Every structure is written in C-alpha cells, then in structure tokens.
Amino acid sequence: MQYISTRGGMQPQPFSETLLEGLAPDGGLAVPEQLPTVDAATLESWRGLSYSQLATEVLALFATDIPREDLARMCEAAYADFPDGVVPLRSIGGGITLVGLSEGPTLAFKDMAMQFLGQILEYVLEKKDSVLNILGATSGDTGSAAEHALRGKDRVSVFMLSPQGRMSPFQRAQMYSLQDANIHNIAVEGVFDDCQNLVKALAGDLEFKRAQHLGAVNSINLARITAQVVYYFWAWLRVTDAVEPEFRDGFEVSFTVPSGNFGNILSGFFAKGMGVPVRRLVLAANENNVLDEFFRTGVYRPRSAADTLATSSPSMDISKASNLERFIFDLVGRDATRVVGAWDDLAAQGFFDFSADQPRFGSEFGIVSGTSTHADRLETIRSVHETTGEIIDPHTADGVKVARSFVEQDVPMLVLETAKPQKFAETIAEAVGVDLEFSPELREMLAAPQKVVEMPDDEAALRGYIETHARH
Ligand SMILES: *Cc1c(COP(=O)(O)O)cnc(C)c1O
C-alpha cells in the first residue's frame, strides 16, 4: 500500500514515510492510493478478536511496510493502559448507544490514536537511527494526549506550547504534572493563536526544522487517522454480536461524531469505504459550525480566529477543518487538479463552493450534519442524566443532541463518546447541579507538583530553548 498527496505532487510513499511529516511536500495531505477493502467473511472472522488484535488486522492493511509481528506488539502496548476495557459500548435509550473512546490515560478520544502513534514513531525512529522533537501548540486535549503517549520515549521529545492562564486547572494538571525529562511544557504569555503562530514560524524555517529534527503529531497525521478507523470496525462487531448470525451480513448502523478538525469522522468515512456497513455518518458541530454549514450548503467558509467562539465544548472550537481536504479529494473523484482549484478559490475569495454536489454528500457519501448549542448541551446532559443516571461530557452531549434528530427505526445509532465528564466539571455542575467525584488517581494528579516553563511570546526565546533542550 502506497500513499499519495491530495494535491497530486508527491511520489507514492509507504506508510512509515508519511508519519514524520505533517503536510505532503506539495501542501496536500497523504491518502491511500486505494482504500483497502474487507469482505463480509473477513469481517465476520474478526468477531472473536480482542481490541488490540483487531487493531493489528486493520492497521496491517494500511502499514504494509511494517512486519506483522512488530505491528501486533505495538498494538498490544498501545492499548494496554485502558483499565475499564478499550472501547466499551453502552445504551442510553432512544435507539442510541455510546461508544466509549475516552478510557485512556487522558480521558479523551485522542488517546485512541496517540497511544498507537507513540509506539510507531519510536519504532520508525529506531529503524532510521534518528530522533524527533515534537513541537506543538495546544489548548487542551491534543497536547496532553501527545505527552502521555510520548513520555519516557528514548527517541522523541515533546515541546508543547500552551496559553498561560487559559487552560482549566484539570487540563493544566494533566500536562504539567508529567515529570519526564523528555516532556517540555511551555506556557506562553498569550492566547492559543500566539502559540500556534510561534509553532508555524519555527516549522516554516526549514533549516531550523531540519537542524532540530522538528516534527508534529497534529490531527492530519495519517497514523492517527488509520488508528481511529479501528473502533468503527469494533463498534459494528459489538453491536452485531446481538444480531442473529444470518442477519449480520450488511447489517447497517449509523454513527454520530462530535467534530472539530474532521479527523474522527474522516476515519469513519474510511471505515465505511472499507466495508463496514454504515448507513449514515452524522457530523455534530457546536456553535463553531463551519462544517455543518458545509454539509448543509456545499459552501466551505472557514472563519478567522477572532470569529471563533469559546464554547463549553472547547475541543470542537475549530473554524478551519484541516482534514476536510481528504473528503474533498474523494468528492471530486480523486482529481488532484480540482482539489488544488478549490484551495485556490479559498485563498482568492475566502470560500469554495460545492453546492452543486451537496445533494451527493448524503445520498452517495452518507454524511449529514447538525449543530448543538450551549443550551442544547445542558439540556442533553440533563435529560440523559434523568433517564439513565449517567453523566455525559459536553462534547458527547453535542453528539447525542444532533443524533436524536437522525435516529431511524431499526438502525442502531452509535454516538462516539469523545471525553469523560470529569474533564469538564464546571459545565456538568451547571447542567445537573452535581459536583463530580474524582477518583483517587485524579485527585493525586490534581495535587501533584507541576513542571512548566513560562515564556514571553517571543520567537527568539523559543528557538533558544529548543536548541538547548532538543534531542540531537
Ligand atoms: C479533538 C476532539 C473532538 C474533535 O475531533 P476531530 O477529530 O477534531 O473532529 C471532539 N471531542 C473531543 C473531546 C476532542 O478532544
């Protein structure tokens, strides 16, 4: 299996070559030359597998340049630290089942992909006898998932910028309590965009980037996308465990995905293309609903950072969906010229327009969408609590709210649970008046000493810090 760029300007490359770079050299994103497919008999033969065994089967279709026994070992290690099972499913009534993706070390779904990425990065660097310094900016979940996946690794260090005083005490503790020598938390005097701009400035300096072995693990990373494909297979297998064997073949389910950068739902789109019987993929947005607008109208108009609202589902506060380009590539029949054309339009006029194709989004690709607001989140958290006694997090609540308007008779609706409510205790208290219990481990984390370097919003200072502390 080889990988090409959505913009047509990259020689086909094997899986492990796509991991260390963010963008393809032509500015596009790496996609499989051809999506692998899984027939019904093979799918059925995977029913008895554990999560990490299933991950090995699915990822082996993508990472054909990595020996199977190595892949199996990495998957085993990646999904070992999930105390309550890797991806549990539970019904909340009304035809809706939650798919638990937040059982990992940072209580959010990014662990699902990042834990595997941590394994495979170290593996590939070992083979190349090389090192990597991850430079990133975070306003929450991505940074902590990356740090927890990469802590203590021999060949990777992490330099994670966060806006000083802008993260919740929980988010700060989750990152800053890590004492590992290869984890560098840098609190910048500024907002998230200032952090992002510093990262862009350094990553754009190719000489510095090469000299310091800088890399990224952001949401366009192909290993993350492929690792996320696995749980769509898993969820279908677990739902159909309860279906009579003769009706399993082609038994359709729908998924609702709380979305920001279009990474999670893109993995679902891949799973559907590979042969998981998916009827609909429902995209749930919060007030920053640039993607809902696109799927309803065909017009994609990213918003500026200033026009991005700070909401109570903060991990979805994104107004430019970096993975959308991979969907557009398929939408235009994998014609890289048309992808380049769309991004030229975007640069020239601030939007691109696929309104003529919009009817196909649902009928041909199965993607529909909806928006949820702060009031919807509170109401949804409340109603789920009343009927089931369960407390769901605000992002999952966005999913449940939007899912409810797409539930169909006899089609299980699976909502991806993307975080644990403990991460967002204030919103939970507002919704149901309950102060959440923290486990002893979480209390210990919140009270632990913190390791963080404070820095002005200054490129020269950051360069100096990286030169001194990077692995070489
Ligand atoms: C990152 C994140 C999302 C959005 O996922 P995308 O892949 O960016 O669409 C949703 N919920 C939570 C809790 C997240 O951390």
Image (cartoon, helix red, strand yellow):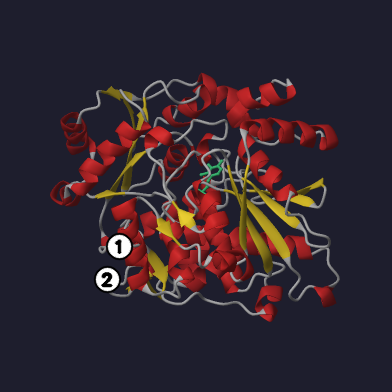
Q: Is residue 84 above or below residue 5?
A: above
Outermost residue, left side: 207
Residue 89 shows in the view: no
Q: Mark 1 points at which residue?
A: 24
Q: Name the amino acid type tagged 1.
A: Ala
Which residue is rendered at x = 46% and y = 77% of the image? Answer: 34
Percent coordinates x, y for residue 353 in the rendering = 44, 60
Residue 374 quadrant: top right
Packing grade of label 2 (10 A; few <14, some 14-19, many >=20) is some
Query: With respect to residue 133, does 358 lie above or below?
Result: below
**In which quadrant of the rendered view does residue 430 lie?**
top right
Task: Provide residue 376's location: percent of width, then percent of height.
Answer: 68, 35
Q: In this view, does 204 lie above or below 281?
A: above
Q: Residue at x 41, y 20 (%)?
A: 165
Label 2, label 1: how many angstroms apart (C-alpha)? 8 Å
Percent of width and height locating residue 298: 51, 59
Residue situated in front as seen by the camera: 340 or 413 = 340
Write down the residue under mark 2: 9
Viewer-nearest of labels 2 and 1? 2
Q: Is residue 98 left or right of 188 when viewed as pictured? A: right
Q: Which residue is drawn at 55% across and 48% down?
A: 259
Of the numbered discs 2 and 1, the one sitting upstream in the chain is: 2
Residue 373, quarter of the rendered image = top right
Q: Which amino acid does label 2 sit on?
A: Gly
Q: What is the quadrant of the N terminus in the image? A: bottom left
